């Protein structure tokens, strides 16, 4: 019998070498992404966008790096509802700036570290660019405004940017226009903790669901946004149902002063809800229950900080509890009036400032004896405060802000035992131009203006380009 030849040992080194020399493409991609992530995390931003932007793009392996272009501060301004948002003088300049990835910046005193505004327009911002922005923005300590126009953002990108905004010490204005989001995540930008004061969401195809989320962000029975001053929702598809949700959010919001709902297909049904929220309205059962909880919490907090009395040692009856609550309500109403008085004194001392007088004259609207707009306001519009949010904010510094929830305000007794709360008298400017409002809604707005307090409430209402004749009697009364 022939002996079997011993088999040669398998050379495993060849296979091992083959695996090392030819790894799967997915492993290479993951390794590169991991290395890039570590490189970005370790990178220390200098606060100079001209330096940090290209460096971070190179670390991420981006093939096309956006160019940083400086624009003079004098030519930078926000857009009105009826204007195109691009402000460059020539078509050739627009093509040069917007055809390729480009970041427009506004500097102060020609210093790279004194960057005030960033504008990205007309090119797709992907997730890599978003990561770069999220890394750079917190280092720009002087940044005031971020403008993203038609950049094809996604919900995920907006969420990432929104998580970065709290790290930006001075960022107060965000303009996010021409960026439709499938999940309508715009409401996240106006959360309770958001520090933004000026938010523009024009031309984003916001519908009923988006408006519902925005209404909830403005206020609910338990929370409200107090920092947002100007909200521009023009050129969307909010409609009557969406306007109803917005009006619901205005019930307990006392921070918003300028609201633009122009060109949103709003008819009489939506306009009626907006008009009713400006005057005293009945609290819902849910709001009444929450009001009782807040009153009890305030009563308990005040009793904890006050010395015990003989009556407090025993068990209080329901009548004594109601009496204490009413006294607490009257005291709180007096206390809330004190801060505005102090601020008014400050405002009076600054009347000699010519710059403040000029800005105040641009926004001031005289009222008649019945609380109607004065004769000088022949063309009411919210364009001016939207164009010049800084001037409006200077005036608002002397207004004071609510110290407590609107549910703790003094209430009135209505019909059938209803509890009435004073309407939203904080809103100063309301733009409803370019909608489908007919003459049926005009008496409602006229009545709302007449019932608002003298010197407060709505000061400008824009109803141009709606479904009624400009010669309609009530519209003439608005303008006279």
Image: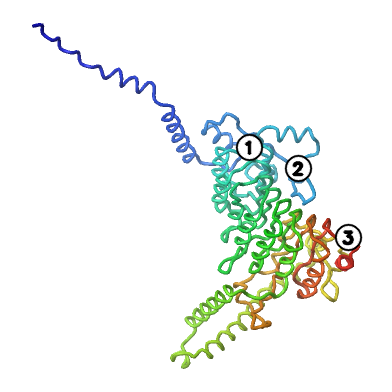
Instruction: Name the residue located 66 percent from the left edge and 38 percent from the top edge.
Output: 103
- Other-residue count near label 2 (Cα within 10 Å), few / some / many at <14 / 14–19 / ≥20: few
In the picture as drawn, the residue positioned furthest to the right comes out as 471
Residue 127 x %, y %: 55, 39
Left or right, 42 with respect to 428, comes to left
Q: Which of 450 and 345 is in front in this view?
A: 450
Q: Mark 1 points at which residue?
A: 124
Label 3 and label 1: CA atoms lie apart by 43 Å
- Other-residue count near label 1 (Cα within 10 Å), few / some / many at <14 / 14–19 / ≥20: some
Residue 226 quadrant: bottom right
**Dot 2 lies on which element?**
loop
Q: Which quadrant, please, contains the C terminus?
A: bottom right
Residue 265 x %, y %: 75, 55
Q: Which of 213 and 320 is in front in this view?
A: 213
Residue 246 quadrant: bottom right
Q: Mark 3 points at which residue?
A: 469
Counting residues from the start of the chain, the first of labels 3 and 2 encountered is: 2
In the picture as drawn, the residue positioned furthest to the bottom comes out as 310
Q: Do the residues labelled 1 and 2 touch (CB within 8 Å)?
A: no
Label 3 and label 2: CA atoms lie apart by 33 Å
Q: Is residue 34 visible?
A: yes
Q: Mark 2 points at which residue?
A: 86
Give the vertical position of 338 relative to 249 (above or below): below
Counting residues from the start of the chain, the first of labels 1 and 2 encountered is: 2
Residue 230 x %, y %: 69, 58
């Amino acid at each position: 019998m022939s002996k079997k030849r011993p088999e040669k040992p398998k050379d495993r080194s060849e296979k091992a070498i083959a695996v090392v020399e030819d790894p799967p493409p997915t492993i290479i991609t993951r390794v590169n992404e991991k290395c890039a992530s570590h490189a970005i995390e370790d990178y220390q931003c200098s606060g100079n966008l001209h330096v940090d932007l290209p460096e971070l793009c190179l670390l991420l392996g981006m093939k096309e790096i956006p160019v940083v272009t400086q624009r003079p501060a004098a030519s930078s301004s926000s857009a009105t509802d009826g204007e195109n948002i691009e402000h460059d003088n020539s078509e050739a300049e627009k093509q040069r700036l917007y055809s390729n990835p480009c970041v427009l910046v506004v500097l102060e005193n020609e210093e790279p570290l004194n960057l005030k505004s960033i504008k990205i327009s007309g090119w797709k911002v992907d997730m890599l660019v978003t990561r770069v922005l999220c890394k750079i923005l917190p280092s720009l300590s002087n940044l005031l405004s971020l403008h993203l126009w038609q950049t094809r953002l996604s919900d995920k990108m907006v969420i990432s940017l929104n998580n970065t905004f709290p790290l930006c010490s001075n960022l107060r204005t965000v303009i996010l226009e021409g960026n439709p989001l499938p999940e309508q995540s715009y409401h996240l930008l106006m959360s309770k903790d958001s520090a933004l004061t000026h938010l523009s969401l024009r031309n984003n195809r916001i519908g009923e669901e988006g408006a519902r989320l925005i209404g909830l962000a403005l206020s609910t029975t338990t929370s409200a946004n107090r920092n947002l001053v100007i909200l521009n929702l023009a050129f969307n598809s909010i409609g009557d149902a969406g306007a109803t949700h917005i009006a619901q959010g205005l019930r307990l919001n006392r921070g918003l002063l300028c609201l633009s709902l122009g060109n949103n297909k709003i008819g009489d049904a939506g306009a009626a809800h907006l008009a009713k929220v400006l005057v005293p309205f009945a609290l819902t059962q849910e709001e009444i229950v929450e009001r009782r909880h807040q009153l009890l919490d305030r009563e308990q907090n005040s009793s904890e900080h006050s010395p015990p009395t003989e009556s407090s040692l025993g068990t209080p009856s329901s009548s004594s509890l109601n009496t204490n609550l009413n006294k607490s309500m009257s005291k709180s109403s007096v206390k809330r009036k004190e801060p505005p008085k102090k601020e008014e004194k400050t405002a009076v001392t600054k009347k000699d400032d010519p710059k403040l007088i000029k800005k105040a004259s641009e926004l001031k609207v005289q009222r008649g004896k019945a609380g109607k707009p004065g004769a000088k306001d022949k063309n009411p519009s919210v364009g001016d405060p939207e164009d010049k949010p800084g001037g409006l904010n200077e005036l608002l510094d002397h207004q004071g802000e609510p110290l407590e929830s609107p549910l703790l305000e003094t209430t009135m007794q209505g019909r059938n035992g209803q509890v009435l709360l004073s309407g939203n008298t904080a809103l100063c400017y309301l733009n409803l131009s370019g909608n489908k409002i007919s003459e049926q809604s005009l008496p409602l707005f006229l009545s709302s203006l007449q019932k608002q307090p003298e010197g407060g409430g709505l000061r400008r209402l824009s109803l141009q380009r709606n479904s009624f004749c400009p010669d309609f009697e009530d519209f003439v009364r608005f303008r006279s």
